[in-house]
Image (tube, grey):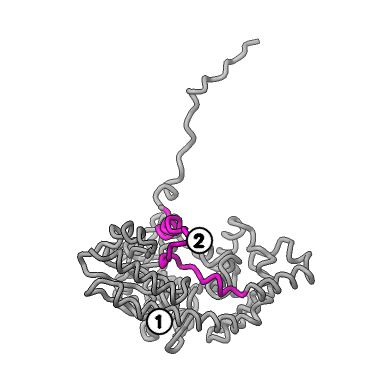
Amino acid sequence: MTVTEPAPHHARAAVPSLAARARSAGGSPVRDILAVTARPEAINFAGGLPAPELFDREGIAAAFRDVLAETPAQALQYATTEGEPSLRTGLAARISARGLATDADDLLITTGSQQGLSLLATALLDPGDTVLVEDPCYLAALQAFRLAGARIVAVPGDAHGVDPRALEELVARERPKLFYTVPTFQNPTGRTLPAECRAAVAEVAARCGLWIVEDDPYGELRYEGERVPWIASYPGAEDRTVLLGSFSKVMAPGIRLGWLRAPAALRRACVVAKQAADLHTPTVNQLAAARYLTGLDAHVARVRDAYRERRDAMLAGLPGALPEGSTWNRSEGGMFLWARLPESYDTTALLPTVVRQDVAYVPGAPFYAGEPDRSTLRLCFVTQTPEEIEEGLRRLGKGLRP
């Protein structure tokens, strides 16, 4: 019998390469900055992190205890992909009370609203398809669409949001599959799209044939002004708008709960995509959240009061922290302020100098799908107390001085 000698160790073949989409997608600059500024002495305006001291630890713990005490077999078992009926029913009632008639069967529970973006990218996008986005745009949405192989085109806008006329022109020219928007307290700019522009966006989608993906993680964090209805509630948008929501900013991000409201055929496609991704969102988390819904409004009211004070502290300190000639917005809610320094400033190049002062922001450039404005930056005001914000802005001003 002939015995074949094993190949020498050095002759081993290389493993196949990563998928092209994985090689080209890139990581999150925000996550990279958070890793650099993890020191306890650092004051971090870079992250989009809710304030941990405001989490309702007792209320959430009680909800988990009750679920595990009363329905342990259900809580610790597999669940349906669509989500626990009690949570979907409670969510549908909340959404309906805010002006958008919704049934439990209209909703898919997701593992954070970020998963909703991934499911939609899987269900809607083929490599090479075009996606329209705001300029600037939420970073993780750009990641999700790039990972799907989409071609991303930015829609021009102004201080209030996207320009519907520019949107219509780009739809006619680019033939996109979808338009992605965060119309209320947008990430990164904090701006809110006015009602008349939302109606115009819905009309463009109806007339031109376009999916609208309306992401609303911050809508309940309003500190002043009147609520603006969801785009999904405007005539023309009913059968072509996906509404995404999240418990991360109003309950706790560690629970990893979001939701997706979509027309039936697209929702079913997302259910199939979710089955392939994770089967279902954790059962015990869903049941605990369903329990907690009864006390959520009171908790959100407390969080809003604290965040309003923090926003006002940052607005009060910006004139002394930023260089002369800088501009910034006054967001009516959400978590972020957006600033533009004089044209000679490059906030990406300046960041290492600022970090040496034990403070951080996110440079604006990564948020742009097209040509970036390198003088811009995003500041998160909710994670620190007013006193910490004051000290952080003092450090920021020192780091930005020539």
Q: Say few, some or many: other residues with alpha carbon within 10 Å of mark 2 (under 14 / 14 to 19 / 20 or more).
A: many
- Quadrant of the image for the N terminus? top right
The magenta stretch is 27-56
Where residue 325 sits: x, y (%)?
22, 74
Q: Which residue is mark 2?
A: 118
> Measuring 42% from the left and 88% from the top, which residue is drawn there?
225
Which amino acid type corresponds to the residue marked 2 in the rendered image? Ser
Mark 2, secondary structure of its residue: helix
On screen, 53 above or below 96?
above
Find out whether residue 223 is within the magenta segment.
no
Q: Which residue is mark 1?
A: 312
> What number is the disc on residue 259?
none
Image position of 189 (left or right of 285): left
> Measuring 61% from the left and 75% from the top, which residue is drawn there?
56
Where residue 154 sits: x, y (%)?
32, 66
Q: Decide: marks 2, 1 in contact (CB < 8 A)?
A: no
Image position of 262 (left or right of 208): right
Q: Say few, some or many: other residues with alpha carbon within 10 Å of mark 1 (under 14 / 14 to 19 / 20 or more).
A: few
Which amino acid type corresponds to the residue marked 1 in the rendered image? Asp
- Give the quadrant of residue 272: bottom right
Where residue 31 sits: x, y (%)?
45, 58
For the residue pair 85 and 126, the one nearer the viewer reads as: 85
Question: Which marked residue is nearer to the observer: mark 2 or mark 1?
Answer: 1
Mark 1, secondary structure of its residue: helix
- Give the quadrant of residue 388: bottom left
On screen, 341 above or below 100?
above
- Give the quadrant of residue 82: bottom right
